[in-house]
Image: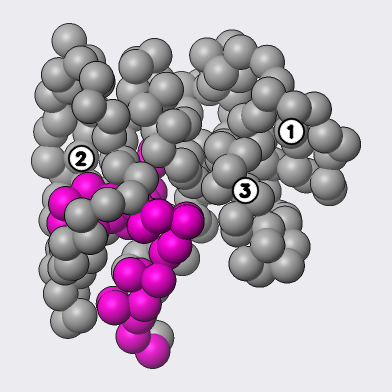
């Protein structure tokens, strides 16, 4: 049986669209840290069985946590440089569209796009991103890695929901509208 699994981007950004300050600095995320609050992350990841992640994001997270992120999920690191698999983590050097279409054709849960910007933009350009859950941190950063590229074509989104939290974070959940 062929299924159609959703590819969902779940990411945090500053109000001005920066996901990492220069030097891959993510310290701005500390502004909204609150004991016991995960902003829906655990509920979201409970629906996920497959993760796709850019290599730069993987390298940063691997160093930050001193290990493989998502060790309990099938994870594909999108890279140009082959590396040996690490448990359920594979370093994928093939065509992104072929990978996503292959994953969608298999039974399973949500396919989580866990960064970064390059991967999110490639998925949008290829028409492969179904939803975006964007947590907006109440800060203007100015410089850094922008979530969405300046050269992206116009893309219509449909608001599925929004939530606000005590620390000022606002989470927006959009479906990508196929034209």
The stretch of residues the image draws in magenta is 6-35
Residue 174: give its label: 2
**Measuring 40% from the left and 38% from the top, which residue is drawn there?**
117
Which is closer to the viewer, label 1 or label 2? 1
**Measuring 66% from the left and 29% from the top, which residue is drawn there?**
79
Q: Please indicate, yes or no, whether residue 171 appears anywhere in the rendered image.
A: no
Relative horizontal placement of residue 119, taking residue 75 as reference (left or right): left
Secondary structure type for disc 1: strand
Viewer-nearest residue: 94 or 175: 94
Residue 58: give its label: 3
Relative horizontal placement of residue 34, taking residue 55 as reference (left or right): left
The answer to the question of whether label 2 and label 3 lie on touching residues, with beta carbons closer than 8 A, is no
Q: Is residue 23 magenta?
A: yes
Secondary structure type for disc 2: strand
Q: Earlier in the sequence, mark 1 or mark 2?
A: 1
- Tell me how far mark 1 sits from mark 2, CA to CA: 29 Å
Viewer-nearest residue: 151 or 61: 151
Relative horizontal placement of residue 127, taking residue 88 as reference (left or right): left
Q: Up-down: is 58 above or below 43?
A: above
The answer to the question of whether label 1 and label 2 lie on touching residues, with beta carbons closer than 8 A, is no
Residue 73: % across, % down: 67, 48
Quarter of the image where the C terminus is located: top left
Residue 91: give its label: 1
Q: Tag 2: Cα neighbours inside 10 Å, few (<14), some, or many (≥20)? A: many
Which is closer to the viewer, label 2 or label 3? 3
Residue 75: % across, % down: 66, 41
Q: Tag 3: Cα neighbours inside 10 Å, few (<14), some, or many (≥20)? A: many
**Measuring 60% from the left and 55% from the top, which residue is drawn there?**
60
Q: Quadrant of residue 9?
A: top left
Q: Earlier in the sequence, mark 1 or mark 3?
A: 3
Residue 92: % across, % down: 70, 26
């Amino acid at each position: 049986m062929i299924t159609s699994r959703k590819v969902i981007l779940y990411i945090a950004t500053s109000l001005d669209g920066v996901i990492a300050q220069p030097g891959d600095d993510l310290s701005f995320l500390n502004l909204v840290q609150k004991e016991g609050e995960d902003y829906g992350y655990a509920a979201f990841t409970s629906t996920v069985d497959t993760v796709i992640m850019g290599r730069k994001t993987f390298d940063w997270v691997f160093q930050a946590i001193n290990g493989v992120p998502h060790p309990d999920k099938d994870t594909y690191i999108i890279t140009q440089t082959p590396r040996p698999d690490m448990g359920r983590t594979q370093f994928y050097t093939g065509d992104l569209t072929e990978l996503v279409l292959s994953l969608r054709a298999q039974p399973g849960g949500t396919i989580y796009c866990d960064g970064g910007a390059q991967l999110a933009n490639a998925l949008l350009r290829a028409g492969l991103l179904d939803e975006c859950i964007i947590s907006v941190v109440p800060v203007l950063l100015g410089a850094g890695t922008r979530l969405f590229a300046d050269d992206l074509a116009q893309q219509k989104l449909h608001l599925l929901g929004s939530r606000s939290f005590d620390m000022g974070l606002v989470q927006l959940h959009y479906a990508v509208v196929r034209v």
